[in-house]
Amino acid sequence: MAAIGAGEALLGRPASSPEAIGSLCRDLEARLMSLPTGKQDHLAALWGGALEILHRPGGERVRRLDVDLEALGRSLVVAYSGETHFSAGNNWQVVRRRLDGDRQVIAAFDGIAEVAAALPAALEEGDLATVGSLMSLEWSHRCRLASEVSTPRVERLLRAAAAAGAWGGKVCGAGGGGCVAVLAPPDRKAAVAAALGGSGARLLETRPLARPLAVTVG
């Protein structure tokens, strides 16, 4: 996304809309990996801030949520589990099971959708304890999609965070490793971070930003 934005600026072309860049990045990624890919990661970076992304017929609808990002940052801990993951591969297995009518996968998707529908209100109300609980609930549904979604190391990290006082958390993206995101009361954030680090995760400096992708030519 950054390369496309910089390339347009370098060539003197008008900047494309976030939707156009997101679609282009999605299609290039799909071609590179020969697997279906999504746009939610792209749109988050292109818009900035906390977003509600509705997947509707004809395309995505994006709404920027009125969220206190500083307060969110005071409770957010992100850590790399130490395990790489192949998210597109996991996602394709799940999609195949859904297309085959797997009842467990259908029920898990319904649960994920219910959590996603409840999150915007909790975020805008600043009820981060509920947001954390919803993150854990989403993870419980996601783990039912396929055995490859979770790993023993990921579960150890989430248990360590909960024992240190976290409200809740989940793996970012499709699972199978990667990063975990956890929400905790501000006065427990340091303890949660220490628990994750002590369990083998690498802590990442993270804070939510409202600023979208910007290209400066100089």
Image (tube, helix red, strand yellow):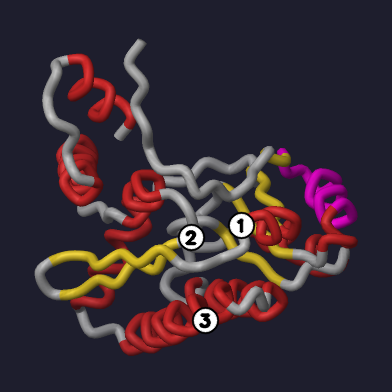
Left or right position of 54 against 13: right
2 or 217: nearer the viewer: 217
Q: Position of residue 130 (x, y in %)?
A: 66, 80
**Disc 3 on helix, strand or loop?**
helix
SS of the residue under disc 1:
helix
What span is colored magenta in the figure? 190-202
Q: Which residue position is annotated with label 2?
A: 50
Q: Residue at x 33, y 29 (%)?
A: 2
Instruction: State which quarter of the image contains the N terminus.
Output: top left
Q: Which residue is under mark 1?
A: 69
Which residue is nearer to you in this view: 139 or 45? 45
Q: Main secondary structure of the magenta part?
A: helix
To which residue does mark 3 refer? 121
Q: Nearer the viewer, residue 47 or 168?
A: 47
From this viewpoint, is residue 34 visible? no
Q: Residue furthest top?
A: 218
Q: Position of residue 184 (x, y in %)?
A: 77, 65
Would you place residue 40 above or below residue 104 in this image?
Answer: above
Residue 54, given in percent of the width and then of the height, sits at 29, 72
Q: Estimate how packed mark 1 is, as few (under 14), some (14 to 19) or many (20 or more) residues with alpha carbons within 10 Å.
A: some
Q: Return the mark for residue 194.
A: none
Q: Amino acid at mark 3?
A: Ala
Give the mark, 2 or 1, whose residue is nearer the N terminus.
2
Magenta stretch containing residue 123, yes or no?
A: no
Name the residue: 36% across, 10% down.
Answer: 218
Labels 2 & 1 near each other (Cβ < 8 A): yes
